[in-house]
Image (cartoon, rainbow, N blue to C red):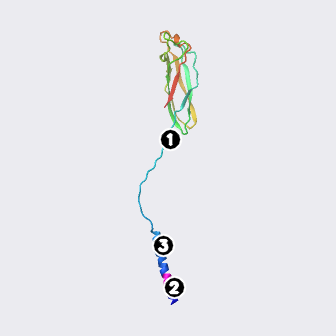
Amino acid sequence: MSRIRNHKAALVVGGLLAVVAAGAAYAYWTNSGTGSGSAATGTNVGITVTQTTTPSGLYPGGPTASLAGSFTNTNAGKVYVHQITATIGTPTGPNIDGTHPCLATDYQINGFPVTVDAEVPATSGGTWTGASIQMLDTGSNQDGCKGATVPLTYASN
C-alpha cells in the first residue's frame, strides 16, 4: 500500500511541477508602447583664407600686382571649398584727409572669384592664385593714396 501511496504522491508532485513550469513559461504580459529619441548633427566654422603675397608700389594707372593665398580647414571634418572672393575696404594712410581722399574705388581687384572646387580634409588646407590688384588712374588728384594701405577682405563658399 505504501508503494501505491508513494506512486500517487509522485504523480501529484509531478503534476504540480508540470503546472508550475507551464505557468512560468507563460507568466508575462504582452504589451505595446511608444518612445522617442534624437540625434544631432555638428556644426562647422568657416575656413581661414590668408593672402600670401604682399603687393606694393601701386600707383595710378600702374600695372597689376598678383594676389595669391592659402586657406585652412580647422574643422574636425572635411569641407568643400568652391570659390574665394575678395572685396576692397576703406584705405588708410598718412596722406588721407578731406582735401586728399583715398577711396576703395581708386583700386580694382581682378580675377575674383577664384575657383578652387576642392574637398579639403580636416585640419588641412590648400592654395589659391590667379587674382590681382591695381590702382586705377581716376583722372583726379590721388595724392591721398600715397603710402596708403588697402585692406582686402576674403571669403569662401
Residue type at mark 1 is Gly
Q: Where is residue 149 drawn, in percent x and y?
A: 55, 18
Residue type at mark 2 is Asn
Tell me the residue that label 2 is attached to: 6
- State which mark lies toward you, 3 or 1: 3
- Residue at screen point 51% across, 85% down: 6
Give me the C-alpha separation between circle 1 and circle 2: 74 Å
Q: Is residue 78 above or below residue 24?
A: above
Residue interval drawn in magenta: 7-11
Q: Where is residue 59 drawn, in percent x and y?
A: 54, 13
Instruction: Depth check: give the residue in front, 56 or 43.
Output: 43
Q: Earlier in the sequence, mark 3 or mark 1?
A: 3
The reply to whether dot 2 and dot 3 touch (C-beta < 8 Å) is no
Q: Earlier in the sequence, mark 2 or mark 3?
A: 2
Tell me the residue that label 1 is attached to: 42
Disc on res. 21: 3
Q: Is residue 58 above or below residue 70?
A: above
Check disc 1: other Cα within 10 Å, few if <14, some if 14-19, many if 20+.
few
The reply to whether dot 1 and dot 2 touch (C-beta < 8 Å) is no
Check disc 3: other Cα within 10 Å, few if <14, some if 14-19, many if 20+.
few
Q: Earlier in the sequence, mark 1 or mark 2?
A: 2
Horizontally, residue 41 falls left or right of residue 57, namely: left
- State which mark lies toward you, 1 or 2: 2
